[in-house]
Image (cartoon, helix red, strand yellow):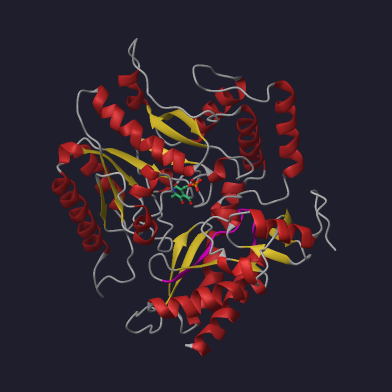
């Protein structure tokens, strides 16, 4: 029997979990009756172990977050303990402390261009929330009243009311309506379902026309911010077509709208560069990050602003009227600093770049399966799209998604020791986003398990 540090036995943990713990984005009904709550007790490298001693390859890096894998607890723990001894907490409201200062300088040094001003928060939703508020107040400080935001369809940007309103996923929005007003959603860069024969240039122009007409439709002088991930996660790793972000930047400049790159997933090496903004030369005014900043060893995120964004806030009596108790927490900052040190020492970002082609070609074997229609992504961030008919690119009905994806593929992957998500927030996809320390052995293992499960799923269609 696996013992865990709490001292509770597996059955006691199970009971306490059933009675008290409310899991996020989880149907709790089955756990109230028969099913066992999955309890993960430890991790090493790219692997996790559950309370029954079963091992899993984590093809999702926690939630697209654990860049360095699970084996650095000792080293990072020492950095956290040292900080606990020195200064366990102080705030960034009105005060600074060494770790937040050092981390801000370190983050700024990694950022492309003049993204130099770092405002710390506790996670990705808060980063998005803070970016939108910052964009609004930036315009107001310059004498303009702009409050609207433009995001993309099916994009996920978080769950707090502002970030949720920016989300382009109807199923997540609907239960909470009315949301914060003033958000429009434009086309994302999903290429798979576009007309046969459309060129890159035509596709890019189509997307840019859509963006510009949404801005005009909203009233260009009321739009504060356009927010986009370099590679959009929800819907399955949509990469930008050539010229897309150059065009987005030009449109934002034309209408004096701030461009925010949401790099909560993309940032800190996931795409084989420190930031997607660097990879695609996006030149955003604002950049949001979280997860990989600390490899999720701490709950810390940030909005990073270009130099010109802070200018209207530098008057004697001006301030950005926003703050969060835990923003820039010294222990969380110490953890993030140590994570970045490890990422540099182990050459994690270079490793992603070096292995990208091998990862892609291993996953490409899945395209031989009749159920796999498309493979797309970059770095260590890939998705396959599942279809019923490759010729027509027809996807699954809601009922088929329920029985086949939620009912079979996802639990079967888990049973076979792979943590990997069959996601149907847009079209049905399976995403691969392992810790950035993964290598060929892990690429083979995840491809093998997914291939076997999808071959079985095909028989059930
Ligand atoms: N933005 C993006 C692009 C994300 O993928 C996420 C979470 O997955 C968020 C924001 C919200 O981050 P968090 O869950 O830390 O609040």
Q: Please state the extent of the stretch shown in magenta in the rendering.
A: 428-439
Residue 349 highlighted magenta (yes or no): no
Give the residue at x 65% y 30%: 331
**Relative image position of residue 20 (x, y in whole percent):** 65, 53
State whether residue 308 is above or below residue 272: above
Give the residue at x 34% y 48%: 166
Residue 114 visible somewhere in the drawing: no
Q: Is residue 198 left or right of residue 420?
A: left
Q: Is residue 6 left or right of residue 216?
A: right
Give the residue at x 18% y 49%: 212
**Relative image position of residue 128 (x, y in whole percent):** 41, 41
- The secondary structure that most of the magenta stretch takes on is loop
State whether residue 395 is above or below residue 44: below
**Relative image position of residue 322 (x, y in whole percent):** 41, 27
The N terminus - image quarter: bottom right
Q: Nearer the viewer, residue 376 or 220?
A: 220
Q: Nearer the viewer, residue 62 or 166?
A: 166
Give the residue at x 60% y 56%: 61
Q: Nearer the viewer, residue 356 or 208?
A: 208
Residue 178 visible somewhere in the drawing: yes
State whether residue 215 is above or below residue 87: below
């Amino acid at each position: 029997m696996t013992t865990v540090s709490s001292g509770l036995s597996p059955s006691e943990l199970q009971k306490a979990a059933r009675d008290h713990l409310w899991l996020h984005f989880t149907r709790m009904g089955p756990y109230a009756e028969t099913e066992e709550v999955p309890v993960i007790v430890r991790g090493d490298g790219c692997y996790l172990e559950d309370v029954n001693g079963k091992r899993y390859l984590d093809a999702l890096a926690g939630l697209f977050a654990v860049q360095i894998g699970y084996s650095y607890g000792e080293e990072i723990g020492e950095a956290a303990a040292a900080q606990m001894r020195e200064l366990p907490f102080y705030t960034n409201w009105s005060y600074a402390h060494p770790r937040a200062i050092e981390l801000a300088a370190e983050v700024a040094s990694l950022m492309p261009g003049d993204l130099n001003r770092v405002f710390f928060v506790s996670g990705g939703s808060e980063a998005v929330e803070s970016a939108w508020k910052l964009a609004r107040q930036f315009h107001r400080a310059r004498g303009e009243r702009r409050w609207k935001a433009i995001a993309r369809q099916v994009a996920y940007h978080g769950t707090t009311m502002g970030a949720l309103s920016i989300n382009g996923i109807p199923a997540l929005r609907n239960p909470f309506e009315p949301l914060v007003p003033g958000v429009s959603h434009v086309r994302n860069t999903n290429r798979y379902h576009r007309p046969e024969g459309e060129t890159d240039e035509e596709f890019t122009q189509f997307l840019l026309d859509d963006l510009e007409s949404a801005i005009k439709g909203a009233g260009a002088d009321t739009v504060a911010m356009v927010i986009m991930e370099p590679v959009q996660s929800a819907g399955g790793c949509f990469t930008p077509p050539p010229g897309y972000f150059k065009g987005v930047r030009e449109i934002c400049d034309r209408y004096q709208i701030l461009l925010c790159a949401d790099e909560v997933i993309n940032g800190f090496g996931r795409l084989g560069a420190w930031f997607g903004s660097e990879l695609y030369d996006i030149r955003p005014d604002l950049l949001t990050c979280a997860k990989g900043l600390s490899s999720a060893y701490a709950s810390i995120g940030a909005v990073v602003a270009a130099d010109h964004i802070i200018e209207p806030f530098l008057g004697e009596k001006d301030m950005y009227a926003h703050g969060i108790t835990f923003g820039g927490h010294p222990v969380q900052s110490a953890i993030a600093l140590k994570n970045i040190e490890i990422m540099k020492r182990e050459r994690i970002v270079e490793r992603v770049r070096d292995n990208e082609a091998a990862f892609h070609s291993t996953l490409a074997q899945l395209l031989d399966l009749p159920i796999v229609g498309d493979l797309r992504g970059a770095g260590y961030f890939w998705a396959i799209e599942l279809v019923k008919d490759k010729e027509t690119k027809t996807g699954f009905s809601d009922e088929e998604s329920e029985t086949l994806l939620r009912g079979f593929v996802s639990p079967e992957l888990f049973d076979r020791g792979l943590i990997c998500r069959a996601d149907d927030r847009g079209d049905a996809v399976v995403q691969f986003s392992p810790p950035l320390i993964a290598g060929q052995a892990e690429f083979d293992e995840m491809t093998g398990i997914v291939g076997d499960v999808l071959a079985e799923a095909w028989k059930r269609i």
